[in-house]
Structures are given as C-alpha cells and as structure tokens.
Image (tube, rainbow, N blue to C red):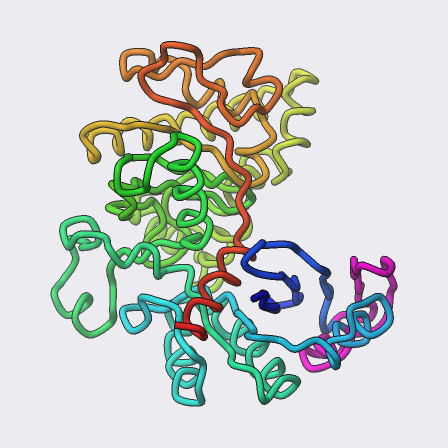
Amino acid sequence: MTAKVLVVNSGSSSIKYQLIELPAGTPIARGSVERIGEPEGRVTHHGPDSTEDRAEPVADHAAGMRAMLDSFASAGPDLATVELTAVGHRVVHGGERFTEPTLITDEVCAVIAELSSLAPLHNPANLRGIEVAREAFPEVPHVAVFDTAFHATLPEHAYTYAVPRDWRSEHGVRRYGFHGTSHAYVSRRAAELLDSEPSGVNVIVLHLGNGASVSAVKGGVCVDTSMGLTPLEGLVMGTRSGDVDPAVVFHMRRAAGLSVDELDDALNKGSGLLGLTGVNDMRELLKLVDGGDAEAALAFEVYCYRIRKYVGAYTAALGHVDAIVFTAGVGEHNPLVRETALRGLGTLGIRLDPERNDRNDAVVSAAGSHVAVLVVPTNEELEIAGQALALVEG
C-alpha cells in the first residue's frame, strides 16, 4: 500500500517542499517559495503535469503556503484531491527534549518555541511553517523531524563542554550537532554500498554544502559530530567560521567595540569562505584559485585542511573506519576537494582512484584501499518522509 507524504522545510525567508510517494521513495512534485517578505518573491514548482516559475509578492509564510497550494493546483497534483498520509517538517533544534520524530501538537509547538534560544535563526522559521501548514491541512498528522535527533546518541564525554556546571544544567550548553537527517540517511546508504548492515560498519560522513559538518558513526550510531551547541562550530563553511578560539569574541569586543549581535552576525554570516575571499560558493572560489588569487588558494587549503584534521580525529575516535563518505553539494560534485582533503592519509589506509574521483563515481577509492571512499547523494526530504510515515503508521 502506498502513502503520500508532504515534506516542508520552512526557513526564515523561504519554504521548500516535496511530495513523496512511499515506500518507493518516488518524488511526485517539488518546489520552493523564496524571498518571503521581500517586494518580489519567487515561486517555483516542478509537478507531473508542468513546471511553474513565477515572480509575485509573498508577504509572509501564510502567503507562501497559499502560493505552494496554488502551484500544486495548477501544475499538479492538486493537494485538495491527494490523500496525504502525513506532513513531515524539518526542525533544526530539538534540544534534549526531542530525540526522535514527534507528532506535532500545540504543546510540542510551545517547546519548539522555547528552544528558539538555542537556534534563533532557525526554530522560529521552522515553527512558522508548521503553524501555517497545520492550518492548511488540519486533518492530516504533522510530524517534526529534528536535525539534532540523530546525534542524541553521543556519549556524555563527547557532548559535554568543559564549562561551569550551571551553564550546562540551567542553560543547556552542550554539543547537539546538526544535519542529522542527512547523516542518518547517508550513513545507512553507505552501509548498503558496502553490502553490510549499518550495525556492521564504522563510517565518517562529510556533509559539505554551504553549511558543513562531519560525524563519526559507529555501527549505525553517531558517537561524535563537529557542530556543537549551534551550527557554528566545526568545519569551515560558506559563511560560518567553524572552530575558532572563543577568546576571539572577547578580543573583537574590546578591540573593535563590536556588539553581541555584530559578533554573531560576523561569525555566522560574514566568515568562512566569504570572510576569507569575498565569495561563499566553492565553484566561484575555485575560479579565483585558477586565476592565481593567493587569498582564494589559502582559503581552499584552510577548508580542506580542517576536513583532514577531523577525518584523523574521528578515525581515532572510532578505532577503525570502513568508509569515508562525501555528501551534499560540494562533497558530491567536487573531486578536487575530496582529493585535497584526503591527501597524505595513506598511512590511515585511505587511497583515492583519480579517474573514479574525477567521474564522481559512487566508489572513488583505489582498489586495495583499506578504507572505502564513497560519494553518496544525500536525500534529507526522503529521510524526513520515511521517519514521518514510520511514526504515523507505527
């Protein structure tokens, strides 16, 4: 018996969505409503009947949801006639309260709102999408799938920061980790490529997009991850700094008089590749490198060196590694990043096949490499749909 699940990913100024038929995992339609709240928005919809791409004002998330419904009605399939089994929602931060998919109620919404202090850029936007979707589909079960949930298995020694006790007990300061739906999906797919059950393999997953994170997955269970209390920690990203000495914040407060909000904005939106080069897209960065830009060349080395350090650290944390797995936009499509990030790791049993790597094959490691190197396209929407359906039917 088939089921249809609508997946909604509501951001601060956009709504991305996909209608998926399960258990086959077939995408029926997908689209986005972007530039919400700006003078001119953009509505894009790819349906079975046709594709739409139009500019129109989208005042708020409620208007964005109406635009989505209009697109389904005109380009198919009409959601008024589709018997939805569930609506799955991506929520970035579940804190310690939500460690698995959760049926959304008014009480759950209230807790998601409370957790906004841990993810002020994400949870409020996620919640707005939930609220307007529940109004649009009041009779359909709505399920929250949390980015942090896959990392809830971190052992205490991995998630604990060496900070004052009251910070931890009263304010929830600890490592949570993010991109959990991607890490869950990709680590499971990696096990399939290795012809094994997830419980039988240890993998390091590198999710490299504009946001980037790495996880150590031991026998299907996440035991460490690079992002922390917020998505700022860890790898160098498009606009986020990743790991820095916390005292940088104090120094810039004293030396430059920057406010808390200015510091937050600089580290989250003005750092990473953007801060190093002025561009946050890896493709643009490599064009600068090819043109002889010394700052861009340095930024690329910094980016790849940080990945290499985490691969080494997580190899130690796991004891042995069966596969290194690259995913997301940069990880899936950039052979030079993979080659540079893994350069010099032959002593760990990691060797690339240059031709396979250049082709972006599923397996890019050389024959005889003790550690497989895989390229696995992520599918967070399918993971959310599957988890939502399992909860509703379970």
Point 38% across, 29% down: residue: 324
Give yes or no for residue 235 being in the magenta stretch. Answer: no
Left or right of residue 85: residue 308: left
Quadrant (top left/top right/bottom left/bottom right) for the C terminus: bottom left
Left or right of residue 223: residue 301: right
Nearer the observer, 230 or 320: 320
Q: Position of residue 217 (x, y in %)?
A: 29, 42
Start and end of the magenta stretch?
38-67
**Does 354 sit above or below residue 125?**
above
Q: Position of residue 26 (x, y in %)?
A: 64, 54
**Does 114 sit above or below residue 368?**
below
Q: Is residue 36 visible?
A: yes
Left or right of residue 150: residue 55: right
Point 62% across, 83% down: residue: 132
Point 38% across, 40% down: residue: 214
Q: Is residue 10 visible?
A: no
Nearer the observer, 256 or 280: 280
The residue most toward the front is 1
**Does 101 sit above or below residue 282?**
below
